[in-house]
Image: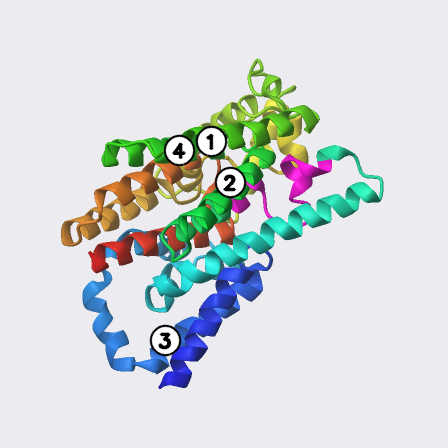
């Protein structure tokens, strides 16, 4: 029995460490943790269904995709992408994740900064240390930044001393500033404001934390070519749209026009992107055609793919879960502010890492409520 629990801890730790680097390897590790958890205590695994209400919002997404496959073809790649929403219910262990996640994030920061410095030594420009240049070979900044933020929250609740926690937060905030992901920082700021409001206090380290973040972000704005703040607000013209706001407006317009054509069942995961590319061509949206851009809005993305019926399924499962399970309001609000605002500008759940990070965050909230 103890050996099976050890195998579960090993697989779950591997899953956390591999998340930013290897989707397939991380998925296999999570499957291993799931199987080890079941084998360690099958009776407890079966009885755990009585505590499943907190996971219903996640499972609503699974049902949406599953039923959507009944009227739209779905690839095995898309189906496998959603498996963490189910497996994590049995595999998750907060004590393991809380110990390993900060280690994994520290490894990511060391790896990326080290690789960036090596590229500079080889003659690369300095902007390789900021924005997407810093993430060369890994996921986009919103995904890596979310992983780092979750790791900092895990470190804050861990056994580290106050000095080490402060140092870890300082390094994380500096790195987030260098990433220069504006919407990520806004989403994190909204979540932090909600937590401060609920706790009726502002931590003493808020001022130095803001300074560190501003310094990192300022460096990213100085070095990042074409991604400075002046690139954010531009006139909305599909032909010229390449900025942070105008691209998303054009993509939302394209998605909305397609949603109106198939409002109830949507276009399906296979046809949605093809329909978007065709609409971009009609709009003469060059940037979208070159990059095959998705909607960059998760709410519109789901409506485009699975229609109003799909969105309704997610809402029904979420509301049913909340009737049977009471989440901690502070944690739920932080989740809603962070991911809710991020989903307005990113199709965050269209990648395996995005789905997994949401599932990981939600599992954390569920376990907090059960421990309380």
Give the alpha-carbon distance from disc 1 to disc 3, as whole Å.
42 Å
Residue at the spot of label 3: 37
Q: Is residue 305 above or below residue 155?
A: above
Q: Nearer the viewer, mark 1 or mark 4?
A: 1
- Picture quarter containing residue 340? top left
- What mark, if any, has residue 208 been given in the picture? 1
- What mark, if any, has residue 170 been given in the picture? 2
Q: Position of residue 252 (x, y in %)?
A: 48, 28
Q: Nearer the viewer, mark 2 or mark 4?
A: 2
Give the alpha-carbon distance from disc 4 to disc 3, as whole Å.
34 Å
Q: For this rendering, which residue is in front, 248 or 7?
A: 7
- Numbered circles on residues, count: 4
For marks 1 and 3, the one nearer the N-term is 3
Tell me which residue sits at (28%, 44%) in the image: 331
Q: For this rendering, which residue is in front, 159 or 189?
A: 159
| Residue furthest to the right | 123
Q: Position of residue 234 (x, y in %)?
A: 58, 15
Q: Which residues are the magenta region?
A: 128-145
Q: Secondary structure at mark 3?
A: helix
Give the alpha-carbon distance from disc 2 to disc 1, as whole Å.
9 Å
Give the crowd class for mark 3: few <14, some 14-19, many >=20 residues within 10 Å: many
Task: Judge whether residue 154 is colored magenta.
Answer: no
For marks 2 and 3, the one nearer the N-term is 3
Give the crowd class for mark 1: few <14, some 14-19, many >=20 residues within 10 Å: few
Residue at the spot of label 4: 341
Give the crowd class for mark 2: few <14, some 14-19, many >=20 residues within 10 Å: many
């Amino acid at each position: 029995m103890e050996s099976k629990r050890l195998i579960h801890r090993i697989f779950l730790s591997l899953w956390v460490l591999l998340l930013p680097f290897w989707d397939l390897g991380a998925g296999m590790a999570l499957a291993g943790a799931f199987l080890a958890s079941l084998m360690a205590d099958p009776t407890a695994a079966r009885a755990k269904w009585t505590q499943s209400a907190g996971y219903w919002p996640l499972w609503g997404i699974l049902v949406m995709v599953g039923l959507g496959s009944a009227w739209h073809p779905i690839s095995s790649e898309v189906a496998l992408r959603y498996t963490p929403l189910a497996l994590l219910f049995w595999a998750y262990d907060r004590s393991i994740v809380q110990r390993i996640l900060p280690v994994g994030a520290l490894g990511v920061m060391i790896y990326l900064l080290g690789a960036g410095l090596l590229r500079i030594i080889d003659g690369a420009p300095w902007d390789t240390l900021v924005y997407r240049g810093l993430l060369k070979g890994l996921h986009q900044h919103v995904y890596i930044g979310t992983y780092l933020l979750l790791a900092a929250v895990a470190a804050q609740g861990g056994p580290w001393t106050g000095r080490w926690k402060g140092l870890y937060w300082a390094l994380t905030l500096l790195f987030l500033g260098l990433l220069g992901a504006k919407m990520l920082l806004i989403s994190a700021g909204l979540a932090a404001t909600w937590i401060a409001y609920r706790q009726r206090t502002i931590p003493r380290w808020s001022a130095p934390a803001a300074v560190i973040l501003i310094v990192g972000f300022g460096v990213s704005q100085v070095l990042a070519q074409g991604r400075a703040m002046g690139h954010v607000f531009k006139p909305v013209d599909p032909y010229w749209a390449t900025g942070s706001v105008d691209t998303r407006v054009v993509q939302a317009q394209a998605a909305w026009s397609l949603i109106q054509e198939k409002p109830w069942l949507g276009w399906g995961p296979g046809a949605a992107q093809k329909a978007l590319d065709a609409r971009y061509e009609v709009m003469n949206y060059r940037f979208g055609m070159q990059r095959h851009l998705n909607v960059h809005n998760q709410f519109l993305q789901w409506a485009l793919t699975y229609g109003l019926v799909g969105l309704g399924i997610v809402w029904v499962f979420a509301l049913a879960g909340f009737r049977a399970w009471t989440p901690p309001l502070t944690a739920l609000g932080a989740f809603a502010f962070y991911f809710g605002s991020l989903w307005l500008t990113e199709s965050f759940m269209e990648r395996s890492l995005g789905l997994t990070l949401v599932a990981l965050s939600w599992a954390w909230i569920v376990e907090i409520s059960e421990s309380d």
